[in-house]
Image (cartoon, rainbow, N blue to C red):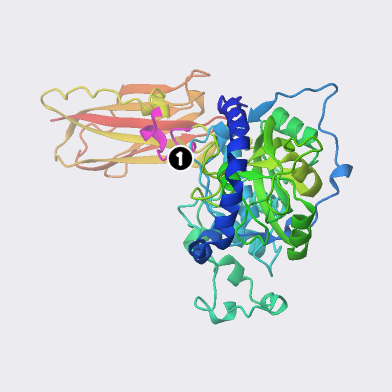
Amino acid sequence: MSMSPTNTSSHRLARAVRWSSVLLASSAWLSACEEPATQGATQVVESEEPTSDLEALLEGAPDPSTLPDELKADQTFPAQFDLVATQSPVKSQGSRGVCSIFSTVALMEHLYMKEGAVAPDFSEQFLQWSVKSELGRFTKTSGSNGSANIEAIHRFGVVEESVMPYETFAWSGSNDPACETTGDKEKDKERPTFCYTNGEPEEQILDARRWTLPSNSRWVSSNAKNLKAFLVENETAVVVGMTFFYQSWNHRKSPLPVSSEYKRQGYVMYPNAKDREHGEEKGAGHSILIVGWDDELEVPVLDHEGKQVLDEDGEPVVERGFFLFKNSWGTSAFGTANPFGAGYGWLSMRYVEEFGRSVSTRPPNEALIERCDDGLDNNFDGLTDCADVACGEMPVCRVEPVEPTPEGLISEYAEVNESIPDHSASGVVSSLYFGDSGLIKSLKLTVDIEHPYRSDLYIELTSPSGERALIWDREGRNATNLNLNVEVTDFVGDELEGVWELYVADEASGDEGSLLRWGLTAELK
């Protein structure tokens, strides 16, 4: 949870913009509606402002009034609140109507960041496929909703963005003849599901590691106080799907005048009657991620003609109280002047209460910190195991200085840093090769193992001829770790040249350890 200082600045900015933007409003609307150059350029910009299938967005959503109350007795809230510090970068859904996929992945990345992930980046492309092909939902539309998306993440998981990058344009007939659109909505619904998922993942993508969430979705009341209580108590953002009103969103396809200044600020107002009529006729939807609020933010209300609404005393009517949200239309147009960054916006609390359906879930069960010994980038910072600065002081990553080999002796060492399977005969096998030929006069073995109970361990050394020597057989009672430096007499007189193998097994359950390094020092006759 954070109380960002930019909340205060946003409030001050809104008060300043309230007057300046209104003075400029009429000219801004005129240019948006009449300039040929602007109208001619809408194709590119509109591709960054797609809407979604409203029916899919609201499918299965309960009446918000039937949901449990999140409020505690006499609970109060700060005037401003935000969770921006645990948000991944704003993305763009391009021209595809997959906003609920983007808002749900934004929620997942936020939940992973809450648990310590530095820069999680999950694949929207894969989740779109998984919801339709693995979960079997919404197979005849590009749309979906947060609840179904979370279920797919929980049951099947998603890969990282680098494994299956997002494609900004939906498949058409140029990709596959079966994906050709006719303009007839009912006929177009008969297209194969792969047209909505841009094909099928390749085998190596399906085999890649998937990341999950620990539970299915939870619907949250869209009442403003209940949403605030959920945000504060859980420090968790909320996905909201809603009816889309074009003038409220200052969308270029609105038949009513829109405000370029409001779009820059990311203001989304409660819809007037004319805007509602048009929006309900179009039946479009949109999904976003709510990440905070500002109770004191005031924005002048505009009518369907784009004129400022005045009260009976001639004073400007303002709307007060907005949720802060993260959008998925990129960073080049929407919210470019928002204090929290391009792509963020302010959504009327009344809008959410009346038209929104809200859903969220729990974060991963385990803290996402680098484990240092499993070959995975656990904290999503692009660095794995000992390459991660977080592992610098861990025993598994300490590189001990190697003593120079005394004259007449021959040494070989191996840095292993491999987990020892718990209670498994497979163990860990590591090899060393000696190229020097000769008979062994003496042989010293060094082993460095990190383990909570070294009495779980069994160790054998095997010579190039295949002979084995027992080194350690579950000794040491309950002491931790094992640092051996022992003479091995079993191989005196044997040939040194060839491959030597160290076998380490954990023969008891409950604790895991790692073979860090080992080495052999030989004196020849």
Q: Residue at x 31, y 23 (%)?
A: 486
Viewer-proximal residue among 500 and 179: 179
Please say whether residue 473 is visible from this viewpoint: yes
Q: Tell whether position 377 is magenta.
A: yes
Q: Which residues are magenta?
A: 370-389
Dot 1, crowdedness within 10 Å: few (<14), some or many (≥20)?
Answer: some
Which kind of residue does numbered mark 1 sit on?
Asp
Measured as percent of width and height from the top left, residue 75 is found at: 80, 23
Residue matched to label 1: 377
- Choose top left, top right, bottom left or bottom right for residue 68: top right
Residue extending furthest left?
407
Quadrant where the image shows the N terminus: top right
Q: Is residue 258 above or below residue 110?
A: below
Q: Secondary structure at mark 1?
A: loop
Viewer-proximal residue among 6 and 172: 6
Q: Is residue 377 above or below residue 94?
A: above
Quadrant where the image shows the C terminus: top left
Measured as percent of width and height from the top left, residue 424 is found at: 52, 40
